[in-house]
Image (cartoon, rainbow, N blue to C red):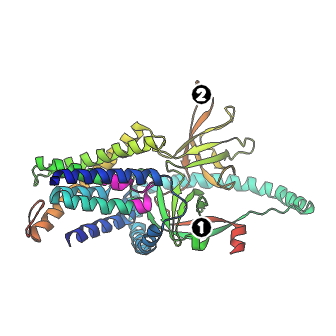
Amino acid sequence: MRYVITALTMFAGFMLQTTLLQHIRIFGVLPNLAIALVVVFSVRLKMPMGICAAAAGGILQDLFFSPAFGMYTLIYLTVAFSVSAISGNFFEDSSATPIIMIAFATICQYLMMIVIYYFAGMQFNLSAIFLRMLLPELLMNAVLCWALYKIFGRILGRIGFESAGRWSNE
Amino acid sequence: MNEFKKKKIMAAFAVLLLLFLIIATFGGGGEISPIENFAGKNIAVIQRGFTVGADFFGNIFNPVANIWRLDKINKELELENQELRRKLIAATLSQKEMEDLSEMKKALNYAQVNGYDFLTCDVVSKDPGTWFNMFMINKGTNDGVYKEQAVINGDGLIGIVYEAGKDWAKVVSIIDNRSSVSFKLLDEKDFSIGIVEGGTERGLSGYLFDPKAEVYAGQEIITSGLGIYPEGLLIGTVSDVIIEKNELLKKIKVEQVVDFKTINRVMVLLPAEEVEAQ
């Protein structure tokens, strides 16, 4: 059931990202709701849920908006693995945790995209990527992820999660 | 084998499988797979509902959010109006010449066929990321939409059909990194041609084949008809000309005419023979 809820959350996020959130594009950049959700699931609920969120979000994005099937799935899975692994070193209730994690995830995503661009023979301008894409997206993702992290924390507290990664019935 | 080792092997297998899929499917195949088709057909209906709702609220809130820009827009429109009046006078003068030429064409039995029909489509959803610029439309192969058909709107060229399902299709816009359009200058004297491409920078960038071509900022460019795009579709306006001593080609920056943030209805250009055959 919890996997279904995670996948449905990612589906709802995908719907919002491809329709409603398009109206808040600033200079062509919009926050990445999928990666923010993957980070929130990975930090709050640890590896299995993070992987499930990453797979659901990645497959959806690959089906409709990817030049190659598997690209977004690979990126989000890498993010989920890495964030789940390193988030244990941070205080879960600290407001800085989601911001540090999303910054790490966004930079990780950009590095992987640059590698894919390079091997696909696509031309890119590193300074334009950094200034015009990465910085604004990083800021937007940080705000979005921080808000989602707080909301999720409250929801999880109410419905019976004792702490991150440990479901009360486990 | 302990649990940790098992997980490691599974992760390595998943990465290899995904890498294989990425390499095998890069660039799109033209026809959408049955799984994509099924998912797209069902999800497009929900997405269209979301888009209509989002557009409704966007149309209400966007003017309010941009109220500080209204004075600037007003001044720009005034200038544009003056320019259009001047063009109207010039067009009226040349209309007589056009009529004479049309008469001549008839006399020579020269039939001009535009060669394309328009299919109006709704934009169902747009790319969720920043790296690519793609969107989905609600018409597919059932309506005659196939890979590499040009997509336009009232302002100008938007892009090209990337993959087509039965009832939906993916469109790649001209500002996407994978886009490349052959253009010519919209000038009375100089019809020099070149290539513009999308990329990670804002707008389009490209070059002219003729280093002696007279190009300046503010000049409009249209599709040349070479390659997959039909001739005469407005692409954008030259915003900058870069001349580098060590390079033979004249580089340009182009501001596209279409605002990709606000497009919600587009037209696919269908070859007339296919429409007649249907």
The residue furthest front is: B1
Circle 2 Cα neighbour tier, 10 Å, few/some/many (<14 / 14–19 / ≥20): few
Question: Where residue B145 sits: x, y (%)?
Answer: 59, 67
The residue furthest top is: B246
Q: Quadrant of the C terminus of chain A?
A: bottom left
- The relative height of residue B150 versus residue A104 in the rendered view (above or below) is below
Q: Secondary structure at mark 1?
A: loop
| Left or right of residue B66: residue A105 | left
Question: What kind of residue is marked 1?
Answer: Val
Q: Of helix, strand and loop, which mostly describes the magenta segment?
A: helix
| Left or right of residue A124: residue B4 | left
Residue A95 visible to the viewer:
yes
Residue A75 visible to the viewer:
no
Residue sitting at x 50%, y 51% = B176
Name the foreground residue: B5 vs B127. Answer: B5
Name the foreground residue: A35 vs B95. Answer: A35
Circle 1 Cα neighbour tier, 10 Å, few/some/many (<14 / 14–19 / ≥20): many
**Residue B200 on the magenta segment:** no
Name the subunit of mark 2. B
**Residue A69 on the magenta segment:** yes
| Left or right of residue B102: residue B265 | left
Q: Which label lies toward us, 1 or 2?
A: 1
Residue pointed to by mark 2:
B247
Residue pointed to by mark 1:
B145
Question: Where residue B46 sits: x, y (%)?
Answer: 40, 74
- The relative height of residue A123 versus residue B69 in the rendered view (above or below) is above
Question: Where residue B250 sits: x, y (%)?
Answer: 61, 33
Task: Please give the range of residues in magenta.
Answer: A62-76
